[in-house]
């Protein structure tokens, strides 16, 4: 493919995914139709279908893009900080800002309705394990640098970090930041990590 | 109403709610129809509609019944134990067994799809606050007995306990107990509580 086509392809794909994210955010995942996204993208139906044939494919493409950004972000935190505890705190800061966006609720909906579909369930499990391995690096780096002394298996700490972040983000999304007190919840998570990593 | 009718009414209501719980557990909340529940209950359509006019009403009735059981359970833990830390551990034991049942996934689905509906959102927020106040008693009782010395506002600890339990239960439901390592997650939550309550 000539360069100009590649750039065009990438730009179109991005345009469609932005439309999909916007529709998922306003309508939710399951109620969103391909036609909604065609309308939102301002492209022809045939044009959109050249790239994606279902909302499921679009959601996965969005999640893959998110995952790549997440991996880069964690990597940049490891590079940037001398103290891995500061890196963790930076991450928690970012988490507090993102929790409860309309798109994150659509993602939870995609997760929670996924158990009915064995194939999606397998996908979700792999995604979870992938996310876990990315986080694990952050904690392992802290151990390597002699900063963290895990009081539990480091995999268990990593999972707890993921599960609880999701729990907090989900409740904040559903009930509002004030009801859940998202900021105090991040403090609580720090308290756990200090105990678990012996900081 | 004469006594016999009351008993009959309660028995019928229970029969319908058991059918609803079974249908929600196998199909999920949103795909479940009133007709599915009529079929499962083995009653006439008119008979079921005398009690409930929507799956939403049925889900709320099930949640209210659950809430009453939950309140009784917490109360019984407070009565039964001298040490509130033992009461908390008993609760966590029960949690580990319940996490990830098909009905609990349907409940999460009901929660996660609820943000689209302002009225349901208000209901969910009230339910959360109610649950929080029930838990709070357990921790307050520990403080009153001189056993717990909260290192954070006790409301924040209570919320963290709820949010993280939900996060763990949700991931276990979606990904399976082994993937999430539910047992080690309960240990992690204990580690947090020990630090937060200075035990």
Image (cartoon, coloured by chain):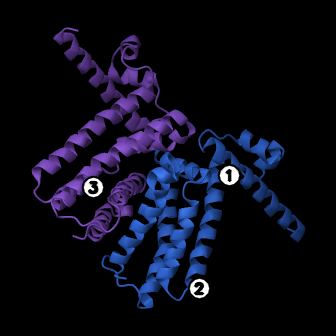
Chain colours: A blue, B purple
Q: Position of residue A90 (x, y in %)?
A: 54, 75
Residue found 38% across the figure and 62% down from its top: B180
Q: Chain of mark 1?
A: A
Residue found 35% across the figure and 29% down from its top: B61
Residue picked out by circle 1: A21
Quarter of the image for residue A97 reads bottom right
Label 2 to label 1, Cα distance in Å? 30 Å
Note whether B44 is above or below A98 in the view shown.
above
User: Of label 2 and label 1, which has the lower sequence position?
Assistant: 1
Label 3 to label 2, Cα distance in Å? 38 Å
Label 1 to label 3, Cα distance in Å? 35 Å
Q: Which mark is residue B65?
A: none
Residue picked out by circle 2: A79
Q: Position of residue A122 (x, y in %)?
A: 49, 56
Total tally of numbered discs in the picture: 3
Residue picked out by circle 3: B96
Report crowding for label 3: few under 14, some 14 to 19, many 20 or more residues within 10 A (C-alpha).
Answer: some
On-image quarter of the C terminus of chain B: bottom left
């Amino acid at each position: 493919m000539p360069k100009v086509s590649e750039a065009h392809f990438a730009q179109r794909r991005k345009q469609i995914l932005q439309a999909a994210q916007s529709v998922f955010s306003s309508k939710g995942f399951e109620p969103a139709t391909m036609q909604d996204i065609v309308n939102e993208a301002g492209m022809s139906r045939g044009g959109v279908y050249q790239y994606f044939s279902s909302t499921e494919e679009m959601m996965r493409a969005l999640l893959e893009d998110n995952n790549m950004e997440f991996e880069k972000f964690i990597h940049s935190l490891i590079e940037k900080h001398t103290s891995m505890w500061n890196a963790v705190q930076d991450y928690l800061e970012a988490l507090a800002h993102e929790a409860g966006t309309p798109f994150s609720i659509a993602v939870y909906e995609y997760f929670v309705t996924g158990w009915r579909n064995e194939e999606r369930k397998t996908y979700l499990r792999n995604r979870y394990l992938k996310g876990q391995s990315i986080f694990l690096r952050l904690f392992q780096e802290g151990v390597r640098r002699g900063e963290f002394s895990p009081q539990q298996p480091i995999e268990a700490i990593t999972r707890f970090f993921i599960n609880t972040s999701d729990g907090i983000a989900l409740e904040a999304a559903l009930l509002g930041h004030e009801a859940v007190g998202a900021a105090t919840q991040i403090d609580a998570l720090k308290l756990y990590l200090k105990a678990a990593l012996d900081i």
